Image (tube, rainbow, N blue to C red):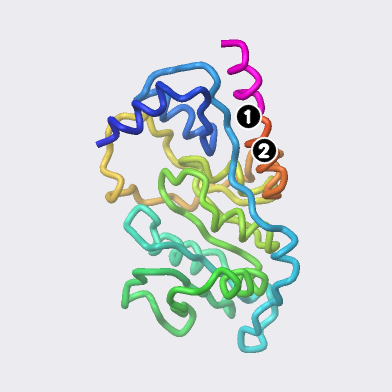
């Protein structure tokens, strides 16, 4: 099913991937090639500054944690909840946003918000001290970029590319390194919350204007080179 993507990959003048993790994964299955650029996702920083913080029952920000996704097994909502109960203050709450939230997650401290608009979600993030994203083998999720821009402390897995955009002050749960062999994505391993560390020093801008300039530079380079062939 990936044959058309591989064909485009091989024929394109340049290829943009979202993370170093993606680059390794694509090289593994599609083969190495020249002119592959890692450009991580960005967000609208100016627009985020204009969104107000949600009033979450009058709670201070340090008492509110959140997470959001289109919830599928590898997004590991239950691991998010388990981490919250293990590490959040006893009087904190967790707000869960997104599609396909299971009915069995809500209780007196875990609250389901359902699917929100972008502005609503940013408002919730700005009211949250921590944003949990313990997904397995995720790539470069926009929701993490937005949460970081909203001032949340990110908690993520070492698997995949999330750590690359989570920020140097984020918390990382260390997992076994995936060897890129075929795996059951919807059957992720259980996490060990004793294996926690600070994020590596990834210093990449999440400003969408900086990201756009990188794309423009790649396209300009293609146009210049094409004049000589």
Magenta span includes 220: yes
Question: Residue at the top extreme?
Answer: 229
Q: Which secondary structure dominates the residues rendered in magenta? A: helix
Residue 195 visible (yes or no): no
Q: Which residue is mark 2?
A: 202
Question: How far across and down, in percent of the image, does residue 160 sit?
Answer: 47, 40
166 or 171: nearer the eye?
166
Q: Quadrant of residue 205?
A: top right
| 159 in the magenta segment | no
Q: Nearer the viewer, mark 1 or mark 2?
A: 1
For the point 50% across and 56% down, which residue is it?
Answer: 133
Circle 1 crowding by C-alpha within 10 Å: few under 14, some 14–19, many from 20 = some
Q: Is residue 108 above or below residue 213?
A: below
Q: Is residue 114 left or right of residue 132?
A: left
SS type, badge 1: helix
Q: Which part of the image, by quadrant, shows the C terminus?
A: top right
The N terminus lies in quadrant: top left
Tag 1 residue: 218
The answer for how far apart the CA atoms under marks 1 and 2 are is 22 Å
* Residue at image location 52% in from the left, 16% down from the top: 34
Q: Is residue 95 visible in the rendered structure shown here? A: yes
Residue 96: percent from the left, percent from the top?
Answer: 47, 72
The residue range painted magenta reads: 219-229
Q: Residue furthest bottom?
A: 57
Residue nearer the viewer, 84 or 114 = 114
Dot placed on the residue nearer the N-terminal end, 1 or 2: 2
As helix, strand or loop, the secondary structure at mark 2 comes to loop
Please tell me how crowded label 2 is: few (under 14), some (14-19), or many (20+) other residues with Cα within 10 Å: few
Residue 4 place in picture, x, y as percent: 31, 32
- Which numbered circle lies on residue 209? none
Relative depth, front residue between 156 and 10: 10
């Amino acid at each position: 099913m990936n044959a058309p993507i591989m064909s485009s990959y091989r024929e394109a003048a340049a290829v943009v991937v979202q993370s170093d993790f993606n680059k390794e994964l694509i090289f593994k299955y599609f083969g190495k090639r020249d002119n592959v650029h890692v450009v991580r996702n960005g967000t609208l920083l100016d627009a985020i500054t204009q969104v107000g913080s949600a009033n979450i029952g009058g709670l201070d920000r340090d008492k509110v944690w959140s997470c959001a996704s289109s919830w599928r097994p590898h997004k590991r909502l239950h691991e998010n909840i388990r981490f919250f109960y293990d590490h959040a203050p006893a009087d904190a709450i967790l707000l869960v946003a997104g599609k396909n939230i299971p009915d069995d997650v809500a209780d007196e401290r875990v609250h389901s918000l359902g699917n929100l608009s972008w502005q609503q979600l940013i408002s919730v993030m700005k009211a949250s001290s921590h944003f949990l994203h313990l997904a397995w083998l995720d790539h470069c999720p926009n929701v993490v970029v937005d949460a970081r821009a909203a001032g949340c402390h990110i908690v993520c897995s070492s698997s995949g590319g999330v750590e690359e955009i989570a920020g140097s002050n984020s918390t990382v749960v260390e997992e076994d390194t995936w060897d890129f062999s075929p795996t059951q994505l919807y059957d992720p391993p259980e996490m060990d919350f004793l294996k926690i560390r600070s994020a590596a020093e990834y210093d990449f801008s999440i400003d969408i204007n900086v990201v756009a300039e990188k794309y423009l530079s790649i396209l300009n380079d293609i146009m210049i080179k094409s004049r000589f062939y």
